[in-house]
Image (cartoon, rainbow, N blue to C red):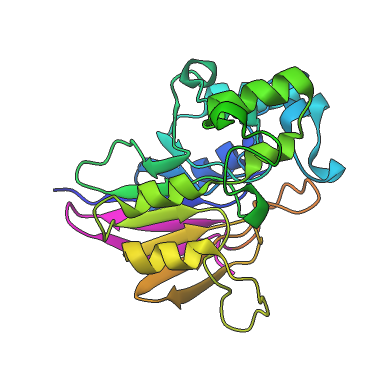
Amino acid sequence: MLKQFVVVVGDVHAAIPLAVEGLTRLELELGAPISQTFSVGDLGLFFTPADWVFLTGPKKYRFPEQSEKIAEAWAMWRWPLAAIAGNHEPFHRLRVFDAEYFGDKLSYTNAGSLDHTIEGLRVYGLSGIHDAEHLEFAAAGEYRRGGIQSWDELLTVVHKNGASVKRLTYYKRSELKHLRSLPAAPHLLLVHDWPEPPDGVVDLIERPERELVADLRPNWVCCGHHHTPARFKSGESDCIALNIIGADRSHRILPGWAAVFTWDGERLNYARSWPDG
């Protein structure tokens, strides 16, 4: 089998035109096509100003005036893409996945195995971030007659009574359980937040991602969220934390935004960080 290039990208925060430019440059450097791309979340496919209503987080990530350019860049996107969600997304299009809206260019999972084009490659993903008070779908006071039990029901509540869109950003206990039910040792696990901090980073938060990695024992873990490029170990697994694509809407792609792997039909092999430091 010919070697195939697999690229995992970090946070994009709606800078889709820059991502298209970057992947095009990367292919030129590789001298070969990219077979499959993956995203660790915060891609930001906000095609209309109305989509931005579902963005959670700081105003600095809100650019409804950029919607047309984002849609135009997505029309130019030519690489198979499989993704998880981060915490700054058009969640109304993801939590109840609207594949048609994205032109069938995107595969996605809230939690589970990711569909992609590489035969034999096993990739799992967990969308969103952790909040101990939001590990169940139903919040306090919503348990009558079983309460909210799915993303579809929770999204309906958000639409109908204005419940905070932030509730769409947090993964659930049932999703962690589902991932643990899958066969262990996938080639790649995508999580938005890191399972534990890399060496030299002070972070005392205990995250379920760490236990998930310990249980699943993936060969590789890729994450984003902290915009801090690093390589480190979590248990038996090799982890790569990816950078944000650029700072302050810069047209310069920051070092470590992407991780380049090769697939030989049996193993996923790390090749390089891109751009180089």
Q: Is residue 78 left or right of residue 164?
A: left
Q: Residue furthest bottom?
A: 200
Q: Is residue 275 left or right of residue 217?
A: right
Q: Nearer the viewer, residue 259 or 42?
A: 42
Q: Residue furthest right?
A: 59
Q: Nearer the viewer, residue 255 or 53?
A: 53
Image quarter of residue 107: top left
Q: Is residue 220 magenta?
A: no
Quarter occupied by the C terminus: bottom right
Instruction: Tell me what residue is drawn at x 77 percent, y 22 percent.
Output: 161
Image coordinates of residue 92 in percent, x first then y, are: 63, 25
Q: Residue furthest left?
A: 1
Image coordinates of residue 147 in percent, x first then y, are: 59, 31
Instruction: Tell me what residue is drawn at x 61 percent, y 55 percent.
Output: 130
Q: Is residue 266 magenta?
A: yes
Q: Residue furthest front?
A: 145
Image coordinates of residue 237 in percent, x first then y, are: 37, 71
Instruction: Tell me what residue is drawn at x 51 percent, y 20 percent.
Output: 98
Q: Which residues are magenta?
A: 256-277
- Residue 211 in sight in this render: yes
Image quarter of residue 188: bottom left
- The answer to whether residue 115 is above or below residue 124 is above
Image coordinates of residue 110 in percent, x first then y, are: 48, 39
- Residue 74 in sight in this render: no
- The answer to whether residue 164 is above or below residue 264 is above
Q: How many marks?
A: 0
